[in-house]
Image (cartoon, helix red, strand yellow):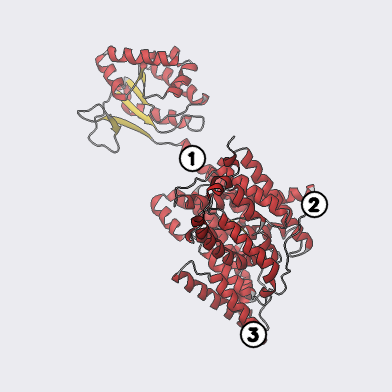
């Protein structure tokens, strides 16, 4: 057993040096500076007291630095997970109450446990059922939902909070005239300042700058802005260890939202990790290890008052751009958060909530991926509509149902594509031994008495009927002239029992009609399955050829020397 695979920190820590530390120090401080105001802001999205956002930035980061396979992914509170937490927990308890906080922490333990179990049993492949168009549609919709929900803090109006955007927009429309002038002014200015600094240089800690400006304005000019809502008291000190109290009925109610958080958190981490992986050659992302790391981050984090956390798009990108090379950067960010919790929380007393809303709105609206939508419209219309359907269902039905629709549509598209693969008739390229697609090569020779066709997929229960129908269609076009069918099986990598039965049935059918059936380019495992199912009781071993051209040549000339050699080779391989 390779202990370094289980505990990835051991891959880089023994060889750690001063050069690596310089990059990690700058990155750790930069991310820490951004993380502190973001943590406070995201806790408010989750419906929790601000300090719980900082708790999320402690133990989860440490656990991921030890067990995560990525050395640059930044773990902690994020806007998307925070909104999902608020959506799920708000139906069970009063926002901000002790029971609400307790449920959010239990949720973190549930999410971590599920992720850890999935990682141990190598279930990371499940994420493959969510295609990139689905992820794009879901992420873009959630970004809009989060952004519109923050208008209540940006404008100083108690708009309704919901993960169904139509209700939020309707409420904003009816109450927009009641906006608080001072709150709106500070919020809009903060948005503009953040955007300007982002345009100048993304490494500039724009969030920290507007936080400091907002605090100074409220502290020294507070009398002129006494109607602006501020954060007020944030308790100092580190979280105390405690085991969440579990209730079976509560766990049952939380399970759907926990599964949503598991999928969303894992998707975010994998997509970010893969993106960062492509920019270096030092390490490779291991999906199942990421599940284990996320699971431990949430499980152990919940013991120290953290709510569900995952990787952050923005902080991970900044971490990499700032020079982070290892997980030490995350540990440096943790030190900064610890210092803040111990000594600096009183400084945030005068922080306007509208400034936090501005930080969140600018961050999440950047996740609305118009570029990907445009690309999909040009490249693949089906993928575009898959993305759009997921986007629309998430916006209108809510985050949880958006995930369900996305997964469902992904499976439907997968089944549709595998059940109707590409099937084409091949023709002989003049003066050569090659057979090519007649739809793409006009000069190929098509003979009335010979049908050479290619089936570009595995042959199994979902597409065996389609295989039979397309074969019969192409054979019918040849009419009574047809004497030979050659199946080019180079693209068939697997055949199940249903596919085998369909093949045997078609061979028998055409044999009765006086049509010979040959196979060309059959892969070894597929050929083994054909022999085991009894196909040799219907046709001879000499009906198998290396290439389509060999099959046609054998049919026309009866040249048996080469075919005898190949048949002998097949027989030996099968034996």
Q: Can I make out residue 477 in this image?
A: yes
User: Which residue is nearer to you in this view: 31 or 468?
Assistant: 31
Q: Residues within 10 Å of mark 2 (few under 14, many from 20)?
A: few
Tag 2 and tag 1, C-beta contact below 8 Å: no
Q: Residues within 10 Å of mark 3 (few under 14, many from 20)?
A: few
> Is 142 drawn above or below residue 556 in the view shown?
below
Q: Which residue lies at the image location 49% right of the left edge and 17% below the top edge?
A: 532
> Is 535 drawn above or below residue 10 in the view shown?
above
Which callout, 3 or 2, points at the residue further toward the start of the chain? 3
User: Which residue is nearer to you in this view: 531 or 58?
Assistant: 58
Q: Return the x and y of residue 428 as percentages of the image width and height.
A: 26, 29
Residue that mark 2 sits on? 245
Which callout, 2 or 1, points at the residue further toward the start of the chain? 2
Which callout, 3 or 1, points at the residue further toward the start of the chain? 3
Residue that mark 3 sits on? 220
> How far apart, in angstroms, are the residues tagged by discs 3 and 2?
44 Å
Left or right of 199? Residue 179 is right
Q: Residues within 10 Å of mark 1 (few under 14, many from 20)?
A: few
Examine the image and state in which quarter residue 96 appears: bottom right
Residue that mark 1 sits on? 416
Q: Secondary structure at mark 2?
A: loop
Task: Mark 3 vs mark 1: give the one in front.
Answer: 3
Q: Return the x and y of residue 449 as percentages of the image width and height.
A: 28, 22
Q: Which residue lies at the image location 65% right of the left edge and 87% below the top edge?
A: 224
> How far apart, in angstroms, are the residues tagged by discs 3 and 1?
64 Å
Outermost residue, left side: 431
Task: Mark 3 vs mark 2: give the one in front.
Answer: 3
Examine the image and state in which quarter residue 301 appears: bottom right
User: Which residue is nearer to you in this view: 571 or 416?
Assistant: 571
Left or right of 542? Residue 139 is right
């Amino acid at each position: 057993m390779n202990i370094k695979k289980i505990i990835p920190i051991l891959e880089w820590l023994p060889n750690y040096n001063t050069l690596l530390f310089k990059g990690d120090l700058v990155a750790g401080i930069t991310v820490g500076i951004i993380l502190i105001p973001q943590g406070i802001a995201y806790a408010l999205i989750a419906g929790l007291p601000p300090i719980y956002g900082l708790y999320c930035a402690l133990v989860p980061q440490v656990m991921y630095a030890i067990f995560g396979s990525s050395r640059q992914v930044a773990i902690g509170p994020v806007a998307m997970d925070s909104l999902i937490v608020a959506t799920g927990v708000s139906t069970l308890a009063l926002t901000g109450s002790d029971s609400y906080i307790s449920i959010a922490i239990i949720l973190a333990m549930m999410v971590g446990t599920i992720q850890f179990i999935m990682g141990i049993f190598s279930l990371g492949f499940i994420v493959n059922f969510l295609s990139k168009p689905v992820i794009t549609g879901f992420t873009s919709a959630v970004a809009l939902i989060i952004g519109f929900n923050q208008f209540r803090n940006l404008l100083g109006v108690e708009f309704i909070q919901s993960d169904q955007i139509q209700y939020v927009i309707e409420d904003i429309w009816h109450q927009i005239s009641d906006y608080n002038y001072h709150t709106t002014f500070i919020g809009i200015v903060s948005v503009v300042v953040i955007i300007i600094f982002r345009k100048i240089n993304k490494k500039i800690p724009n969030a920290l700058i507007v936080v400091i400006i907002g605090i100074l304005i409220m502290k020294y000019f507070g009398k002129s802005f006494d109607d602006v809502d501020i954060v007020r008291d944030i308790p100092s000190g580190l979280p105390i260890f405690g085991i969440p109290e579990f209730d079976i009925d509560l766990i049952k109610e939380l399970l759907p939202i926990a599964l949503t958080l598991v999928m969303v958190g894992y998707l975010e981490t994998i997509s970010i990790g893969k993106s960062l992986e492509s920019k270096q050659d030092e390490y490779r992302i291991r999906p199942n290890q990421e599940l284990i790391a996320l699971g431990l981050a949430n499980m152990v984090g919940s013991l120290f008052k953290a709510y569900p956390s995952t990787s952050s798009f923005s902080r991970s990108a900044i971490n990499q751009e700032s020079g982070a090379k290892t997980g030490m950067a995350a540990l440096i960010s943790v030190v900064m958060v610890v210092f803040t919790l111990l000594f600096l929380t009183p400084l945030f007393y005068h922080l306007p909530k509208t400034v936090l809303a501005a930080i969140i709105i600018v961050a999440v609206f950047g996740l609305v991926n118009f570029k990907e939508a445009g690309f999909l419209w040009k490249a693949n219309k089906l993928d575009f509509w898959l993305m759009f359907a997921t986007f629309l269902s998430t916006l209108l039905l809510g985050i949880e149902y958006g995930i369900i629709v996305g997964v469902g549509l992904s499976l439907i598209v997968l089944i549709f594509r595998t059940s109707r693969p590409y099937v084409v008739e091949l023709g002989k390229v003049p003066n050569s031994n090659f057979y090519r697609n007649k739809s793409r090569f006009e000069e190929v020779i098509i003979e009335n008495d010979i049908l050479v066709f290619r089936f570009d997929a595995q042959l199994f229960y979902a597409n065996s009927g389609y295989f039979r129908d397309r074969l019969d269609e192409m054979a019918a076009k040849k009419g009574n002239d047809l004497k030979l069918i050659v199946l080019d099986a180079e693209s068939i990598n697997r055949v199940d029992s249903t596919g085998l039965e369909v093949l045997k049935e078609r061979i028998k059918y055409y044999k009765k009609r006086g049509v010979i059936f040959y196979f060309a380019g059959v892969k070894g495992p597929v050929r083994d399955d054909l022999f085991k199912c009894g196909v040799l009781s219907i046709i001879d071993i000499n009906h198998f050829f290396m290439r389509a051209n060999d099959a046609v040549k054998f049919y026309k000339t009866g040249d048996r020397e080469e075919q005898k050699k190949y048949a002998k080779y097949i027989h030996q391989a099968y034996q």
